[in-house]
Each structure stands twice: as C-alpha cells, then as structure tokens.
Amino acid sequence: MELLSQLSQGFAAALSFGNIAYCLVGVTLGTLIGVLPGIGPVATIAMLLPATYGLPPLSALIMLAGIYYGAQYGGSTSAILVNLPGESSSVVTCLDGHAMARQGRAGAALGIAALGSFFAGSVATLIIAVLAAPLAELALKFGPAEYFSLMVLGLVAAVVLANGSLIKAIAMIILGLLLGLVGTDVNSGVERFTFGIPELSDGFGFVVVSMGLFGIAEIIYNLEKGEKRDFFATSVGGIWPSRDDFRQSWKPVLRGTTLGSILGVLPGGGAILSSFAAYTLEKRLAKDSSRFGKGAIEGVAAPEAANNAGAQTSFIPLLTLGIPPNAVMALMVGAMMIHGIVPGPQVMTERPELFWGLIASMWIGNALLVLLNLPLIGIWIRLLKVPYRLLYPAILLFCCVGVYSVNQSALEVAFTVGFGLLGYLFIKLDCEPAPLLLGFVLGPLMEENLRRALLLARGDATVFFTRPLSLGLLVATLLLVLILVLPKVRQTREVAFQED
Amino acid sequence: MNPLRRTLLKTALAGAGLGLTGPLLAAPTPAAFPGRTVKVIVPYPAGGVVDVVTRIVTEHLSSLWGQPVIVESRPGANGNIGADAVRTAPPDGHTLLVGSLFLAVNPLLDKNAKVSPRDFAAIGSLGMPPNLLVVPAASPVRTLKEFVALAKRRPGELNAANPGVGSSNHLGTEIFQAEAGIDLNLVGYKGQPPFIPDLFNGQLDFAFVTVALAATHIRSGKLRPLAVSYSERLKSFPEIPTVAEAGYPQSAVLPWNGLFAPAGTPAPVLARIAGDLERVLKLPDVQQRYDGLDAVNPGLQQAAFERFVSSEESRWRRVITERKIKPE
C-alpha cells in the first residue's frame, strides 16, 4: 500500500508540535476573518505572506491553507447571522441560513454548516490523496468551449435560485451580466463602461457588489422596520440541530460534497459554481421546493458541504498542474516560490513530505475547525441578543474595513454604499439579489470563454456541439430549461381550466 | 574605503557628470534618509513574481537601513493605480515604486493613463524571470526555425496565447511575428496561468510564457521550449538557445522591472538608494534566490536605467503603431 505509507509520511510531518500549532493558528485566523464581513482570505494571506519567510515551507503552507479553508467555515457564520456573504461561496448560504436565523434556528443552521463542512472537507481531502492525478487529467479536458457550456448551465440554473417571479429572476440575472461587462476587454484591451475611472478598469469587485446588495441593503431595511428583532432570540434553548435536521440533511451533504469535489477541480472557475449548483440541485429534488428561501435546512447543508469540498479540491490543479485556479491559490504559488519551490507535478515526487504533509494537515485542520466552531455557536447566538442599534454600526464598520482591505481603495467603499442603496431598492421591488450576483460572477467568465472558444475555432460556432463534454453540458442545460418550463405550462393550464 | 562609500562616491560622481547637482546640492543630505519606514509599492497582486522578486531585495535593504521596508500591493488598471499612488507621494525616497514594462507601454496604449516614465526618477533595475517561447510537447516542431516554417505554411491558423494587451508576452509575440514574417491567431486570456491547460490539450500552438511558470512543465515534458526571449541563456536551462541564436534577435523582450522614486526626489537620496540596491543585488543570498527563480537582471542604475526606459518607450511606440495594437 503505497498510499498508506505516503499518508503516514504526511501525518508524521504534519503532526509535529510546531505544525499542529501553525495549523491551529491558520484555521483560527481563517474562522475569524471568515466571520468578519469583507476581510477575505486573499487579503489575509497577502498580509501574512512576508511573515512566512522565516518558517519552514511545510509550516508556511499548512498555515496559509488553514486560513483558506478556515475562512469557508467562518464565512457561513456571518452569512447566517447577519446576511453578509464575505465570499462568493456563502451567497447561497444567506438564502436559507439567514431565514433559519430569523426563525430562531441560527444554532441549527450553524451546526449543520459546520458538521456538513467537516464531512465534505474530510471526503475531499481523501479524494485529493487518492485521485489527484486522474482528476487533474480530467480538468485538462476542459477547454474554453466546455467552460462556456458549463457557465450557460450555471446561468440557467440561477433562475432556480429565485423564489418569486421568474421574469424578475431573469431580469436580475441580465442586470448582473451587464454589471459584469464593466472593465477591460480581454482580447482588445478596450475599456468598457469605466468612464475613465482607473478603479473600474478591472470591473467591480465581487466583495463590493455582494457586500452592498446583501449586507448594507439588509441594514437599511432592518433600520426602516425598527427594533423588532426579537425573533432571533426566541428559541435559544435549541441551539443544536435536531434529530430531524440530521435526517433531512445527510443526503444533501453527500450530494453537495460530490458536486463540490468535482467542480472544485476545474481550474477555470468551477469552484464558484459549486455552492450554487448544490443549492439548485436540492431545490429541484425537494418534494416541496416552496420551503426553499424560507429556512430549508437542506439549502444550508448542501451548499456548505459543496463549497468546503470545492475549497479542498481546488488544491488539485495547483499541486498537480502548477496552475492556480483562484486568487488564493495564486498566493499559495507565491508562498511556495518564496521558499524556492516551483508548484507543479514535481512537488509530489521531489518533495513528497511537503505534498503529503499538506494533505494530512487538511484533515487535522478540518477536525480542529469542528472542535473550534461547535462551541463557538453558543457565543455567536448570544451575539444576536446584542441590540441592533449597537450591532449595525459595528457591521457597517467591518464592511468598510473589509472592502478597503481588498485594494486599499476608498472609492470602492463608496461603490459598496452605492450597491447598498441599489440593494435596498431591490428589496422594495421584491427582486432577489442572488441571481444578479451569479450573473455578475459568471457573465465575464462566460464571455471570455465564448470568445476564446470562437477564436480558437476561427469563428466556427459548431465547436460547442462537436466537443462531447461541451455537448453534454448543453444537453443538460436544455433538460433544465424543460424542467423549469414544464411545471409553469402545467400551472397555466390549470389556471386556464379553472377559468372555464 | 568601504564598498558602500565607494559606490556612493561613484554614483554621486556619475550624477555630477550629468548635471544633476547645482540647486540639488541644497537638498537634504542622505543622512535624512531613511528617516522612517520605507514603503515600496508593487502595482501587482501579492504573491506574484514581481512581489517575490521585490521582497527578496527589500528584506536586505531593511536590515541595511535599520528601518522597516514595507512592500504594499496596489494592483489594478495594469499597474496604473499603484504607479499613480507613488507619483503623488512626497518625493523624499520613503515611497518607492516597482515599475516595469507597463510604465513605458501604458501611456502608448491608453490616452487616459495618468502616469508616464517622466513622473519618476529611475533608481535601478531589479530582476525578472524572462519569457520562453514554447510549444506543446505534441507539436511537430523542434526548433524556432521549424516553427516559423510551419507558421508560414499555415498563415493565420496557428493559435498563440495573449495573456494581456501590452504585456511582455503580447508584445514579444507581436515583435516575433513581425521579425519572422508570420501571422499567428492571438487568443486573449486573463494572465498566464489560465492558458497553460489549453497548451497542454493542444488548442494553443504557441506561447511566450514566463520561465517561472513554464519550468516545471518543461521538466515534466509537457511543454517544449524553443528559445529564451533574452540576450543570455538561462543558468537552469543552458540547453535552450536565445532568440538571437535561434535567428530572431529582435524578439528578446524582457519583462524588466526596477525601483523608481517620484520625480523630484533629491539626487543624494536617489544615489544612496541606488548604491544600496546595487550592493544588495550582489549578496550571495539574493543571487542564489534570484537564480532559483531564474530571474535575470540587466543591472542598470539611475541614468543608464532611465535611458533604457526611454529606449523601451520608442521601441514599443514603433511596434504598437506598426502592428496596429492600440485599442480603438
């Protein structure tokens, strides 16, 4: 058993006292910045990078990786408690997680999120250990045409995210796509809709848009309603998920883990889709999909499992191909380069103690996170008892600090406020921001890959249908459209009959 | 005389020769620098090659000066945002910029660009890993000449990666096409890592890619290097010919970078920093770590570096006009 000996070598390296300590520091910091709105792992790792110079490379990587997946745990906390998604992955958690909190079930939501994440993280780590190399080969089969088709599937699925009017959901997706157009065109270098503002030449930041639409808008709305937030504290007694909750959640966690593990491997932005995809799948599979958006525990369990699984498996393209799939992984490349390690397939053979040590540390880290997060739930819930007039200025302050920390730009803080006002308007108009955010995130990726695929095929649009993987994804999209449309057709027919 | 004093004297003399003295003699003496924390702004995301290369040097500058030297990442607008922050900072040497190719190229591509090389005083070049001209392992070509022959047989059909308009990779590919008389189909990407998978799966036929990213894939046999886009061969890959040796001397395009101060920084301060930078770059630790990254440094200081930057400007002004690169 080569794998066992490699893993034991990894654990031997990761279980040294120093490395456990660095792992603990990493995951604790990660949880903390995850909870604080806006201060994401990118800014934190960037700040800590110089501090890792003096550390042995393995300790440095263990700590930085811990910050990354620790932030995934913590991110769900602020999403559930105060409707603030700090990371793209926790946008979906807001939908049902915050609804659960409003029903006084914040503890159940937090508990399921932590346990689901732990399960997903452990499974995904096992997947990295066993299947990293073949999965990386699969990821290479994904070219621009495949990414485009995947993004189309994702966008159509975004319609499912909404609970209300279909027309409004589509309108919000399109608005998101339009917002995503702001920035520099990849092929020609022309700036679009930037109005000569240099800060816009890379487009709006995700944190800016999500923080405004969700966090700030929610605060304005709550203040308008006055201090009637007693619903949060009604049933503090039941801070743990009940037996029923577990019964409802274990299948969604399994499905979320599977989806997240697969999408996380794709270096071209697959991980972004993982939590959205898991949520969509659960809503479709549910017997009564109307519960979603109103506090369905499956709507927390599945996406939380998916985003944590995706966070772990996104190490695969980095460790096996040397290709960083997102900004955090790009920082990990920097951390490795500082120590003279070139990430890529050689790491596994030339520095096995590093590769396997990092994988082993992810297990240890996930276990530490559960031990850390479960006792914290009680404290987080007590936080909700803080009067809102004291809580909201603090949230606003952290939002501003968080947005500022991304690019040290005061203008971006102003943009966030602007999106906050827009979000308030959306609440008034009964339009949901989640589809807009997905359109905003996927739109640029979709355009980039569409044009890239067409350039590579010299304008031959059949490329999307002749490449088997791409065709498969488009067929899946078509099926999803049919599933979406059919009940509507049935409903209209029923309405028609009633009128007869 | 210790080496530092000697360097200082030399640079001061060089400055005098260029008529930089005169009114500047009344400026604060080098003793006023460094009076506090020195901030070095890297206009790229933290953790990138430029960031790493900078930190190797600032670490030693910090211990030399007995003051913290902070590297601050201010990415955005292809370097313009970070550069603008330094342009408007007090010209006293405590805020420095790591400027690179973008300083010379941005004003040529973007009429709204707020910064130009004239806004800065050049201190000295740092190092950067050069680009390699690579093809996928499955490609039939073994040498750059063979690639050019293939491209001539199939004009406009071979796909080449373009990780950003105005990047060294893009400009290198343009100048190489002009020099070799070939026509490649350029496909846009956001940065270099995203196009690597498309090279592996054969959708791309060619790329200018930094050795920092390509080295591991060359060793694992997935990419085949044809030439180094620099005037010298690399220590870690001595078997790869330079573009000049492969027959295309114009195609040497280094993504150079270096330390700049806001224009108007007193000459003695510039000379002090330049001298210390030169000294730090010679340290065995820095050399060793630069070699580990395959970073090469043209070793230019102050006036020579400034001349190099203007030569880059005129070179790229010509290429951008001739190749019609400017976005409309």
Image (cartoon, coloured by chain):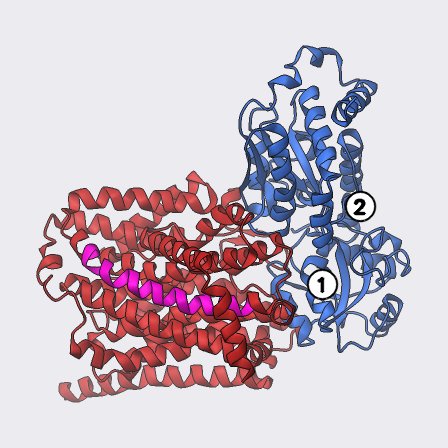
Chain colours: A red, B blue
Pointer 1 chain: B
Q: Position of residue A274 (x, y in %)?
A: 41, 72
Examine the image and state in which quarter residue B306 appears: top right
Instruction: Determine the CA span between mark 2 and mark 1.
Output: 32 Å
Which residue is drawn at the image coordinates 53% and 73% (left, top)? A147
In the rendered structure, which segment of residues is drawn in magenta?
A355-380
Task: Give x and y (percent) for residue A172.
Answer: 35, 63
**Quarter of the rendering occupied by the N terminus of chain B:** top right
Which numbered dot is residue B177?
none
**What x and y, as percent, mark residue A289?**
23, 79
The residue pinned by badge 1 equals B215
> Could you say whether the residue bearing mark 1 is in a helix, strand or loop?
helix
- The residue singled out by tag 2 in the image is B318
How many badges with numbers are in the image?
Answer: 2
In terms of secondary structure, where does tag 2 sit? helix
Tag nearer the camera, 2 or 1: 1
- The secondary structure that most of the magenta stretch takes on is helix
Residue B291 visible to the viewer: yes
Residue type, label 2: Arg
- Please name the amino acid that badge 1 sits on: Ala
Whether residue A358 is in magenta: the answer is yes
Relative to A425, say whether B309 is above or below: above
Q: Does residue A58 sit above or below A44 in this rendering?
A: below
- Mark 2 belongs to chain: B
Dot 2 and dot 1 residues touching (CB under 8 Å): no
Residue A266 visible in the current orientation: no
Q: Are dots 2 and 1 on a single chain?
A: yes
2 or 1: tag closer to the N-terminus: 1
Asked where in the image residue B298 lies, by quadrant, the reply is: top right
Neighbour tally class for label 2: few under 14, some 14-19, many 20 plus, Cα within 10 Å: few
Query: Which class describes the residues within 10 Å of circle 1: few (<14), some (14-19), or many (20+)?
Result: many
Residue at (60% x, 65% y) in the render? B194
